[in-house]
Amino acid sequence: MMSGSQRFWFWAVVWVSVITLSAPTLVVLGASFTAGNIIAFPPEGLSLRWYEKIVLARELQQAFLRSLIVSVICTVISVPVGTLAGIAMARFTFRFGNAIQMYLLLPFTIPLIGSGIGLMMLFGQLGALGSLWPVGLACAVINLPFIIWSVASSAALLDPDLEHAAANCGAGRVQTFLYVTLPAVMPGVITGSLLMFILAMNEFLVSLLLTDARTVTLPVQIYNSIRSIITPDLAAVSVVFIVIAGAAIALLDRLVGLEIFLKSK
Amino acid sequence: MSTPKPFRYPLRWRAMDFLEGAADRLWPSKLSRFTGWLFIAPALILVASLAAGLVEIADNSFRKLDVETFRMSDDYSLDNYRTAFASDVYLNVALRSLGGALLTTVLTLLLAFPYAYVMVRTRSAAARKALLICLFLPFFIGQVVRAYGWLIILGNDGIVNHAISVLGIEPQRFLFNFPAVVFGLVQYMLPFAVLMLAPALTAIPEETETAAKSLGANWPRAMWHVVLPMAKPGLIGAGLVVLTLALTDFAMPAMLGGGSQDFIANAIYDQFFRTSDAGLGAALTLLLVMAGTFLVGVVLSLFGAGTLAIGRRT
């Protein structure tokens, strides 16, 4: 139990954090419904005019579509790769295990700008820049540790005896994998795929480096538009991200429970 | 009397038999020892693209840009590194990034520890859920939209300035300075830090604190002598992630710094896309990668992988 003064101080700090974390989201939501032309306080009444404006904006819609495609490519690549790697890291002992762990953490330890520039040069050499699959692939690589991580922590909870029991009852290797191992790591796979999808949807710096004027994704499009002037139509577009984030959280909570992130390994 | 139908294998059995047969042919049981390597190979290959990218960067960093033809030289030299080290501009940018990253790390951990602690220890499931949602929503919304939100709130023409002008106070310049960038980084890093700390705190049995308190320790002492030492792996993991992410961040300095508060990543970007000197840009990138790797290496070798560790605990 927390004592009285501890409760007071800790909750005070938590409230500061909660407000700081939530303020931009709430303000973007509010600004998107404003009736006025500029972002004003107090608000000048409610309207959906900015939403009407973005429904007609082809550029924004196409950027959104591209972001979706990038997310799908990233998820399709990273989920099988990450799931197998996560299972392997948790269930097998490797010679040079530590070195492999360090290697698989490279996407986190190499600064994002380094990874981005490197992939930009690499894809440039291959003549692949200008299409969307390099962006999806890049997102899969730079976020790969997330899914390996979540699958590995699920796999670590699976009692190896269950697999042995399945084998003992006559199940082959494929059957054991499909009916025992895979269902056991499913919470990790679900968490990981949602993370990969959302992070690819939001990825900004790598998108900025790997896209050109014809292939910009939505975060880059928003960034480029902010530079000139702040208008509420950008807030209305940003609400798309808020809605997607909300849906992903609801899904995550429904399927595996958000509390999974509090569990210790 | 009808003849009994011959027993037919269900489709699923046949599919399984086929798969098992295929597996036996493609990956015979005697290779089972290497199944782990088979599983991990695709991930190793994907990550190899980063290594290949680094090689590409290294190659470029030794080539000098010919200002007359605007081509990269064919022969290698260390000129780009000389330029990078000789210039005060890059030294300033590097010091600003490092200072900003260190400040961000300290502030983020100060905010993240109570957050994670309350979230893990609270008796109310609803409060825990609410705190988790407050954490995930910004994490899932992304940097650009969050920075945009802060521009609306704190910008020169933003909500706060409108509000205080109603009260008759002169508009203030909240953004486009160093504190604004650090603030932006702290609020961006907070979810990462809390999510890395929380599992470490979950692992600490509450009884240890109760025991400390029953032996006469007040809560600050129980925190300092019991909880913090036990949470060290989590704190190190979280601090490390925050430090490296802040040190190499691009969006916050670009959007909340307004061009005057560039971090290393912004300087690199400008070399590639404004000055178009890929050689110097590559040299700066490689220096940043080495600095980052060195930092991570030192911390990992001193304290171990902490909560960053993947898979088996050794």
Image (cartoon, helix red, strand yellow):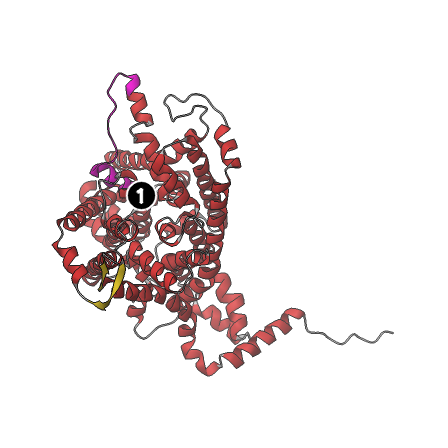
Residue drawn at x 32%, y 34% is B151
Q: Viewer-proximal residue, B2 or A185? A: A185
B182 drawn magenta: yes
Q: Position of residue B73 (x, y in %)?
A: 24, 64
Q: Is residue B231 left or right of residue A121?
A: left
Q: Which residue is mark 1?
A: B188
B114 displayed left or right of A67: left
Amino acid carrying label 1: it is Tyr
Query: Helix, strand, or loop for circle 1?
Result: helix
Q: Which residues are magenta?
A: B165-191
Please indicate, yes or no, whether residue A215 appears anywhere in the rendered image: yes
Of B195 and A137, the residue lying toward us: A137
Q: Is residue B130 above or below residue A96?
A: above
Tell which of B67 and B89 is nearer to you.
B67
Identify the image quadrant of residue B145. top left
Please give the name of the residue rendered at 27% of the width and 60% of the height, measured from the top-left corner.
Answer: B71
Q: Position of residue B203 (x, y in %)?
A: 31, 53
Chain hosting mark 1: B
Which quarter of the figure has residue B141? top left
Q: Is residue A116 magenta?
A: no
Quadrant showing the C terminus of chain B: bottom left
Answer few, some or many: residues within 10 Å of disc 1's Cα (few below 14, many 20 plus, some between 14 and 19): many
Residue at (57, 79) in percent of width and height: B21
Asked whether, in this view, residue A178 is left or right of residue A36, the answer is right
Q: Say which quarter of the image contains residue B60.
A: bottom left
Q: Nearer the viewer, residue B172 or B25?
A: B172
Relative height, residue A118 to residue B213 (above, below): below
Q: Residue B179 in the image: x percent, y percent?
A: 21, 37
Q: Position of residue A14 (x, y in %)?
A: 30, 37
